[in-house]
Amino acid sequence: MTVDLIVPCYNESAVLNMFYNEASRVADSIKNYDFNFIFVNDGSKDNTLEIMKELAEKDKRVKYISFSRNFGKESAMYAGLKNSSGDYTVILDADLQHPPALIPEMLKAMEEGYDCCATNRATRDGDPFVRTFFTRRFYSFINKISEVNMPDGAGDFRMMNRKMVEAVIALSEVQRFSKGIFSWVGFNTKWISFNNVERAAGQTKWSFWGLLKYAAAGITAFSTFPLKVAIYLGSLISVSSFVYLIYIVIKTLVHGKDLPGYASIIAILLFLGGCIMLCCGIMGEYIAKIYIEVKNRPVYIIGETNIDKPEHDYGR
Ligand code: UDP
Ligand code: MG
């Protein structure tokens, strides 16, 4: 049996060797399985690619794929999955925040007959407080409004069998949100938890703004609830203005006409204008997604690789 380790890397020269040593130590301690590394260089600006090449030089199990520019972790994971052929595939971060030491436990789950062994972080120790707070809110929100279930703390660190990998690859959308995709494809998943560790070296690639955009992308990718908000809001406003209309008619009939009312008219006008723009904005978000998806552009473009493959793998 073979196991592929997919490692997306963006400016990871500070930890890549450390990662390789730790992962191969774990791999060598496991009997009956052959391991392969698939490092995906996501347009790093440091010497991450050189380190990958050095590793490939001294270890035949090391494969690398280097993108023509930075396409994001989602694209890097997709490229890794598309180019993996092992019976089992593990996706893990280069910064050792996803301990390779869990791999034996994952293999045990697969031997028990699970299609997937996923991990969630038991704690978020070491993450900034604001990030933890908003991440929690995000998970409780998205689980309420979308049909897929994403447990809080579920990361991309997981082992999947071939069946599931093929299913994940079949979802070839350009704007990928893997946490949702993994859950959407289904399959028998065993969850194990691990304690959060701080990254071994180097820096996180996520800014608060970046995470916020990622969260919004996740919501629009797996839920049409925001579109329904427009309908609810519209209905609410229509009903209340109808009630108000009846009130005015009766008031005019009883007390006669009165002219003043400038303030209330302006207030209502501004409120309605705001609602209309909000709804247009929500629709615009979805139309933008359709636009990008319809263009059907590649998910990634490979600059160089040591994997034997057809010339033009654009991840489509
Ligand atoms: N990563 C990537 N492309 C990017 C950003 C990140 O391939 O554009 C990789 C990164 O090299 C690391 C993993 O994704 O292996 C997780 O990134 P990071 O540790 O910065 O995120 P955090 O652990 O802080 O959520
Ligand atoms: Mg990390």
Image (spheres, rainbow, N blue to C red):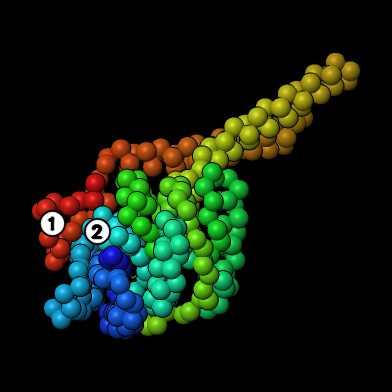
**10 Å neighbourhood of mark 2: few (<14), some, or many (≥20)?**
some
- Kindly give the residue lying farthest to the left in the view shown: 311
Q: What element carries label 1?
A: loop
| Residue at 24%, 46% in the rendered image | 316
**At which x and y percent is residue 42?**
26, 65
Tell which of 173 and 56 is nearer to you: 56
Name the residue type under label 1.
Lys
Farthest residue to the top: give it: 253
The answer to whether residue 281 is left or right of residue 312 is right
Residue 85 - label:
2
- Between residues 119 and 208, which one lies in front from this camera angle? 119
Mark 1 CB within 8 Å of ligand 1: no
Residue at the location (45% across, 62% down)?
112
Q: What kind of residue is marked 2? A: Ser
Tell me the tag on residue 309: 1
Q: Tell me how far mark 2 sits from mark 1, CA to CA.
A: 12 Å
Location of residue 266 in the rendering, given as x and y in whole percent from the top left corner: 66, 35
Residue 38 position in % (x across, y down): 25, 67
For residue 67, the mark is none
In the rendered image, the vertical position of residue 292 relative to residue 119, given as above or below: above
Sequence-wise, the earlier of marks 2 and 1 is 2
> From the viewer's perspective, is 144 left or right of 89?
right
User: In this picture, is 29 found above or below 32?
Assistant: below
Residue at image position (23%, 51%) is 315
- Examine the image and state in which quarter residue 15 appears: bottom left
Q: Residue furthest right?
A: 254
Q: Do the residues labelled 2 and 1 touch (CB within 8 Å)?
A: no
Say which element carries label 2.
loop
Q: Is residue 149 visible?
A: yes
Q: Where is the N terminus found, in terms of image quarters?
A: bottom left
- Classify residue 189 as left or right of residue 77: right
Can residue 156 be seen from the camera position used here?
Answer: no
